[in-house]
Image (cartoon, helix red, strand yellow):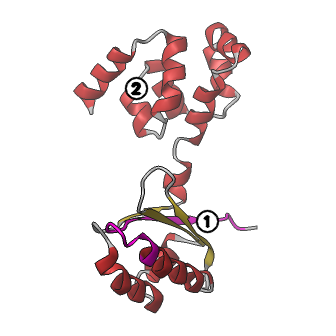
Amino acid sequence: MADLELAVVIGSFEARTGRHGELAAVLAKYVVLTRRRPHCRNVDLVASASTPGRVVVIEKWESADDARAHLDEAETVEMAQAARDLLAAPPDLDLFDETTATRGIRLNKAAYSLKDEHQRELFRRDEEAWMEQFGLTESERELMRDRDWIGLWRGGMSIYVMVKLSGVTKTPLPEIGRQMREQG
């Protein structure tokens, strides 16, 4: 079986005051039409619960090339034209491919595990064995050993799980911030 590829497009749209319903209708039509396209796995339309007037479209495609090609399709062009006067600002569009979606997954799993006492104990007792269980690559292990915080972040480690690692290594957050400022 071939490796499964996935690309995700996320579009965030801000409606002009009083135009949220109209924008949602335009995007709902786009979603229905896009779901019918070849190579489209799914499309969802969600409204923000915290920001009035914000609507997000989440598209899943078989490949990044399929997602890019869809930008020139008739329903995309029609949606852009219909939404133009309803938007408070240009939409924010992002493409996430398999590489960006999985970057840092091993580092994040490892650091997140430190929420459990037995993982913290293993880390303190035998850091190499702790890293081994997550299948960290040699370059990821080196980042961990060196406490290369900016390197870990660039490698995909979320700042939220980095805090767990900083607690176990007793590295103060201001020290991490200093390193990131100097090397970032």
Q: Which residue is mark 1?
A: 5
Image quadrant holding the C terminus, namely top left
Q: Is residue 142 visible?
A: no
Q: Determine crowd level at label 1: few under 14, some 14-19, many 20+ residues with C-alpha closer than 10 A.
A: few
Q: CA distance from mark 1 to mark 2?
A: 30 Å
Is label 2 in a helix, a strand or a loop?
A: helix
Magenta range is 2-22
Looking at this rendering, what residue extends furthest in the right direction? Answer: 1
- The verdict on residue 150 being magenta is no
Q: Position of residue 132 (x, y in %)?
A: 67, 27
Nearest to the observer: residue 133 or residue 79 = 79
Q: Is residue 105 above or below residue 164?
A: below
Residue type (three-letter) at the residue carrying disc 1: Glu
Secondary structure at badge 1 equals loop
Q: How many marks?
A: 2
Residue bearing mark 2: 149
Q: Position of residue 138 (x, y in %)?
A: 54, 32
